[in-house]
Amino acid sequence: NEEFLSRCDTPTLFMNSDCVNDVFNQTNIDKDVIERCMLDSGGLDGDTINQKLDIELASQTTQGIVVLPTLLVNTMPLRGAFSASSAFNAICAGFLDG
């Protein structure tokens, strides 16, 4: 969510409960629903299996789905980690010099 990234995307604020709660309030996200989902998935305490994530990963494996960040430039897929600079360079490479 852009709201979270604009407000809490620093090492000190990322896990700051005041910042996270402020974003929940600003975006009308029900914090209880999110916390219930996390608890139902295995919780955040201890070394437990995230059941919802395991189900999704198993489903992807059985269906042959591979999810990577993908950027299409002139119908060519570029996969992996991207920065604004690498995306810009890929786009510009499609144009002839001159």
Image (spheres, rainbow, N blue to C red):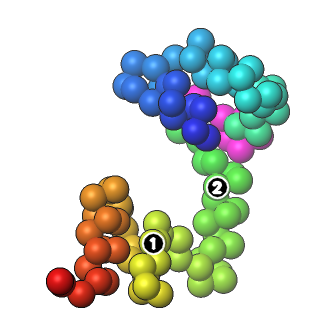
Mark 2 vs mark 1: give the one in front. Answer: 1
Looking at the image, the residue that sits furthest to the top is 18
- The quarter of the picture where residue 77 lies is bottom left
Residue 44 placed where, x, y %? 60, 32
On the rendered image, what quadrant is the N terminus found in? top right
Q: Nearer the viewer, residue 51 or 1?
A: 1
Label 1 crowd (10 A; few <14 / some 14-19 / many >=20): some
Query: How would you classify the magenta stretch by its main secondary structure?
Result: loop
Residue highlighted by disc 2 = 53
Q: Which residues are magenta?
A: 39-46
Residue 38 percent across, percent down from the top left = 70, 37
In x, y percent, where is residue 26?
A: 71, 23
Q: CA distance from mark 2 to mark 1?
A: 24 Å
Q: Residue at x 67, y 64 (%)?
A: 56
The amino acid type, in three-letter code, at marker 2 is Leu
Which element type, helix, strand or loop, lies under badge 1?
strand
The residue indicated by pointer 1 is 71
Q: Please, what secondary structure does the residue beneath circle 2 have?
A: helix
The amino acid type, in three-letter code, at marker 1 is: Leu
Q: What residue is at 47 percent from the left and 87 percent from the top?
A: 75
Res. 89 visible in picture: yes
